[in-house]
Amino acid sequence: MSSETNEILHANQSHVEASPEFNYLDEDFTHLFVPEKFNGENYRVWAKSVKREIEGRGKLGLITGEYEKPDESNSSAMVNWKAQDAIVSLWLINSMTPEVRRAFMYEPTAQAIWEAVRDCFDMKEDPFLLYVLNRKCWLLEQGEREVIDYWVELADIWQKIDLNTEEGKWACDHDAAIYRKRVDDDRVFQFLAGLNESFDGVRRRILERSSLPSPGEVYAEVRREASFRKVMSKPSALVREDNIDRGNRWSKGRLSCDHCKKTGHSRDTCWDLHGKPPNWKPRRGKSRGYHVHCL
């Protein structure tokens, strides 16, 4: 943590401790749990993660302006507001890479930081980026990967497309639902198109339905098919091993000794040449031709 952020934290520490609304005085007090820091190229992903994290901590109003700054005459309320705002400012600054945070370190409030970053990096819809992401979807194939690995990569691209696409304004919820269904159907097609040929059967069953399931439901069905195949392949392996063992026993029965001219053993184990094994005992009711010795 930089010296500047340390100064802000220590200046407000006593006020935060006195406020019942703060319960973050642990080792992660000044940090948000975000999957990746803002580096200037990932604004939409960063903004979504940060907004969700701050909302979960009950402080979203400090970056949206809903939690308004109190009147200067109310000193206790002002002290508490400044303490909370300083902490949210730290969350935002510490969720950026060192190279980026320098441009926003001295913004006066958390809302000012949030809006400054948005004004600089929110490009709305970027047609080139959306083209690249959609092209990746249609070219992506399962290949040698497991179904889950293929699905996770595809779902990650879909999320990036959603984050970089402006939400449409619909006249009614029904129109919005129709549009969402069309998007989901396209994603089902993309997922099925990239599956290996070995999944032709389950792919055909899904496409033959009058109404396509959601992408998540389609993935679950394909995953069950893949799991079923793994389970069924194990007995097959045991059968093959059993057949190999039987084949070895059959081959052993076809052995022939070039010394005594008998079958069932070879010259290396012939009793006429090497004698019986020390622990050999005759089997009751059974005798083998190559075990009989004339005296």
Image: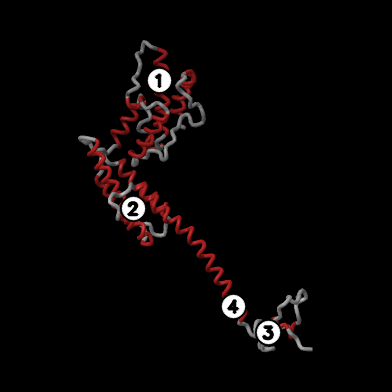
Task: Report the side of 264 relative to 272 (left or right).
Answer: left
- Tag 1: amino acid: Lys
The kind of residue tagged 3 is Arg
Residues under labels 2 and 3: Cα distance? 63 Å
Q: At x 44% / y 35%, what residue is drawn?
A: 33
Q: Earlier in the sequence, mark 2 or mark 4?
A: 2
User: Quick check: 24 above or below 294?
Assistant: above
Query: Label 1: how many residues lie within 10 Å, few (<14), some (14-19) or many (20+)?
Result: some
Instruction: Write down the residue under mark 4.
Output: 250
Q: Is residue 199 left or right of residue 241?
A: left
- Amino acid on which the number 4 mark rests in the picture: Trp
Q: Quadrant of residue 265?
A: bottom right
**Separation of disc 1 and disc 4 at Cα?**
88 Å
**Residue position for label 1:** 82
Q: CA distance from mark 2 to mark 1?
A: 49 Å
Which residue is at a point 35% across and 36% down the rendered structure image? 48
Q: Which residue is mark 2?
A: 191
Place of residue 271 in the rendered image (x, y in percent of width and height, measured from the top left): 73, 83
Mark 3 surroundings within 10 Å by alpha-carbon count, few (fewer than 14), some (14 through 19), many (20 or more): some
